[in-house]
Amino acid sequence: MSVKFSRYNREVKNNSPWIHQLNKERKPIKLGSDIEIDVAIVGGGIAGVSTAFFTLRNTDKKVALFEGNRLGHGATGHNAGQITSYFERPLIELVNEFGLKQATEGQHSIEMAWELLDEIYTEAGLDIPLARFTGYDGLSTFEQIILELKERVLRKQGGLPITPVFIAENIESKDNIPEEFVGFYSLVPQEEILKKLETNDVGFIALIESHKGVMNSALFTEEVAMYLLDKYKDRFSIFENTKVPKLVLKEDHALLDAEHHCVTAKEVVLCTNGFENIKIFNTSGLEIDTRFHHSVHGVVGRMTGYVENTTKSPIAINYYMGPQWNFDDMGEPYYYLTRRTYEFNNNEHSLTCLGGPQQMIPSRAEYRADFDYPDEIEPTADKFLHKLYNIDQSKNIDYKFNWHGLMGYTTNGVRMVGRDPKNSVLLYNLGCNGVGILPSIFGGEKVSRVIKGEKFPPSIFDVRSN
């Protein structure tokens, strides 16, 4: 489904519930002079702040973070707020590209980022809401079931923990499941599957469970940044409303064009969504700029949310839809729904969010964060919630929040983490690839260890030369 963003046709613009909760009283500081530092971090979202957290903790470097807007106001403040540890790309494809060892080690790294998230919460003394629970994915085709079973075989071979696939015992296609998958699935009444998915639609014939969570990653970013400014007063600075349109790489340092001022840094880490208007000049002559800008493409995700005057248990559910629904105008293979406790108008409520409709854009210039929310999305959300989710057809849903955000997708769907092979002064922690919170935190911790001097074996996250 192609949706065009219009600038002036609605009163409600890009209205994110996460930015709604940020500190409106905080005064940003803009870079006011030329400076020299050890590490420059470009991007003030969860990736940039996580990179700053671990770099300050694990090294004695002097660090400065630069954000063209406000902290957490980019992709971090316009995401779905769902914490998951899977890649949007199937594990079987990663194994085919990188081999079993690297692919499963990469998956393990993302799953271990839950521990890194806990470390940040503990060390920073955060008390902002974070819910962790068992989440669900609903499957609707036999092909989806077989793919999940193949992935569990690979996970076992790679030494990863395994959760079973739950398949409705009343479907005829269960008899066609190959014997090699015995032990990787369980047959259960379909009612159990539908209850967990919170739907009555019998089109869902199987379910998988995984560790998931929900949090306001923009508020997390802001709170961690304030903690770092307080703890590392002598060697950490944040400059907001400070764009970095040009980066010049020397052999042993980098020069950042920060509008009216110059930043000299021994190392620079790009923690943007990977789809920014930044020019990279490498004085060694090896091309970086063109490769960098061709390695990431932009996808606009669109979400909507409604508030209920009650508090319900948090959930995170993916609905993988098959052709049987014939939702031609919905145009997406899956939708995701989250629910969490949310403070609204000084009272606790339940905020339910629905996402799924996406649009690829060929150039950064075609997206603006202040574009109005597309008119078509609320009717699409109504259609999903009334037909698949347990909402009465007659109920009029009052969407309090409608928002969209730009996600950077790398060519191979894997985050770029580490040094640039053509100039070691430049490092990356970027590439949302649709699932960004845990990979951002993992990437920040790994980059800090690279800066410290630690050597790593080849991994799926390495920055490629081409």
Image (cartoon, rainbow, N blue to C red):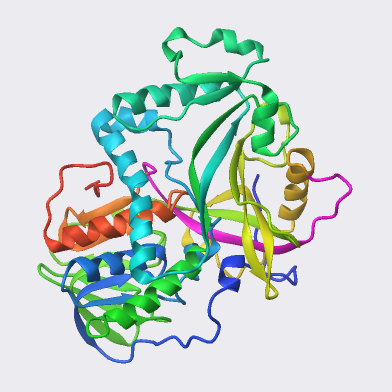
Residue 420, given in percent of the width and then of the height, sits at 20, 56
Q: Is residue 36 magenta?
A: no
Please give the range of residues in magenta: 391-413
Does 232 sit left or right of 48 as displayed? left
Whether 405 is drawn above or below 169: the answer is: below
Residue at (12, 55) in percent of width and height = 454
Does 3 sit left or right of 123 as displayed? right
Whether 432 is drawn above or below 279: the answer is: above
Q: Quadrant of the N terminus?
A: top right
Q: Nearer the viewer, residue 402 or 349?
A: 349
Determine if residue 74 is in view.
Answer: no
On the image, which quarter does residue 143 sit in?
top right
Q: Is residue 412 magenta?
A: yes
Residue 377, given in percent of the width and then of the height, sits at 71, 53
Q: Nearer the viewer, residue 456 or 432?
A: 456
Residue at (40, 29) in percent of width and height = 162
On the image, which quarter does residue 232 sit in?
bottom left
Whether 375 is drawn above or below 348: the answer is: above
Identity of the residue furthest to the right in this view: 394
Q: Nearer the viewer, residue 287 or 38?
A: 38
Does 297 sit left or right of 215 as displayed? left
Residue 362, given in percent of the width and then of the height, sits at 49, 53
Residue 48, given in percent of the width and then of the height, sits at 35, 66
